[in-house]
Image: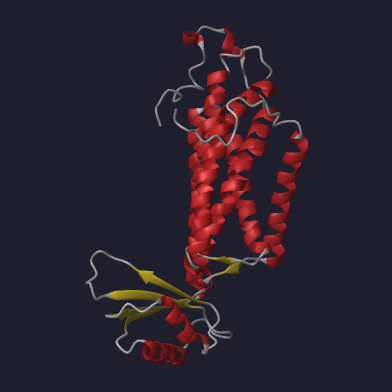
Amino acid sequence: MAFRLRLVPTHTNIDFFRWQWLTFGASVVLTVLSLLSVAVFGLNFGVDFKGGTTIRAESSQNIDIREYRQALESLGLGEVSINEVFDPAFRADQHVKMLRVAPQEGYEAVTPEVIDQIEAALRQVDPAVTFPSVESVGPKVSNELIWKALMAVAAASLGIWIYVWLRFEWQFAVGCVAALVHDVIVTVGVFSVFQLKFDLTIVAALLTILGYSVNDTVVIFDRLRENLPKYKTMPLRELMNLTTNETLSRTVMTMTTVALAQLALIIFGGDVIRGFVFAMFFGTFIGAYSTLYVAKNIVLMLGLDRSDGDKPKKERRKVDHEFANIDA
């Protein structure tokens, strides 16, 4: 007989609404505190949002990034981001690295003298290195990137809201988007409280969190919609508890496997992707929490019109279920 790992018993009967107002209230408090933290302490923006200079370094030798970092430490440049670039079109002896240097205090960009010092320090480590391009990003471009990042997150949330509204009913859409907004704000609040570097990779992580969180929420909502005609007389609160218990094993297993992969990347992935992976790691847990204790609570508070449950299937309203049977 095959061995099956079960993190959750096959049949559970957990009352997820036992502490309904405490859990929902905690989410509201965390959201407000996160907004206050961003307003008071701000975010530790990276070079993408603060502006700075990007230097492309190419060499025929594959020099470790750590050696580049050590060569620049003595210059006291502050924040320096170094990433290795991979491209199938590169030659076998073409090794490319991108350096991003934050502007020095009192300047909008890195001065030519500092760029010369950077290039000289890198040549001591790798005499074969060349610098094909040096580009500076000013404060105006950085401000545009901030707004575009906000618009990207807002557009993703709007698209998800429209999808859930078409797929289910408007109460589900409100609960789903409220959970997504909660996830994003609390994650950003953590970066504000601990002053972790916030750059474009973190924005990508926030968009990933939106996708993960809505996936878990839609799975539970889909099961709830299936159960509505099965249990016509069961109170909505009990029905939502039943539905959540039925999908709990899937939720826990998915969250655990995703978190294990992310934990490995946090430990062994290095400094370059650590902030990105940490955002997703935290978002995995906060996304599961918001699905269980934010989205469902809002749907319960708004209520659902279950009057169609007593009618024959062909007589039920077509508006709410116009897209319900589309496989997506």
Above or below for 239 versus 4: above
What percent of the width, then of the height, locates residue 21?
77, 36
State left or right for residue 56 relative to residue 247: left
Res. 183 visible in picture: yes
Which quadrant of the figure contains the C terminus? top left
Residue occupying image coordinates x 48% and y 29%: 167
What percent of the width, then of the height, locates residue 128?
29, 87
Residue 104 in which image quadrant: bottom right
Q: Nearer the viewer, residue 31 or 305?
A: 31
Residue occupying image coordinates x 51% and y 6%: 312
What percent of the width, then of the height, locates residue 300?
68, 28
Which quadrant of the figure contains the N terminus? top left
State left or right for residue 224 relative to residue 301: left
State left or right for residue 290 relative to residue 126: right
Above or below for 138 versus 11: below
Q: Nearer the viewer, residue 223 or 104?
A: 223
Residue occupying image coordinates x 63% and y 46%: 182
Above or below for 133 versus 202: below
Res. 110 visible in picture: no
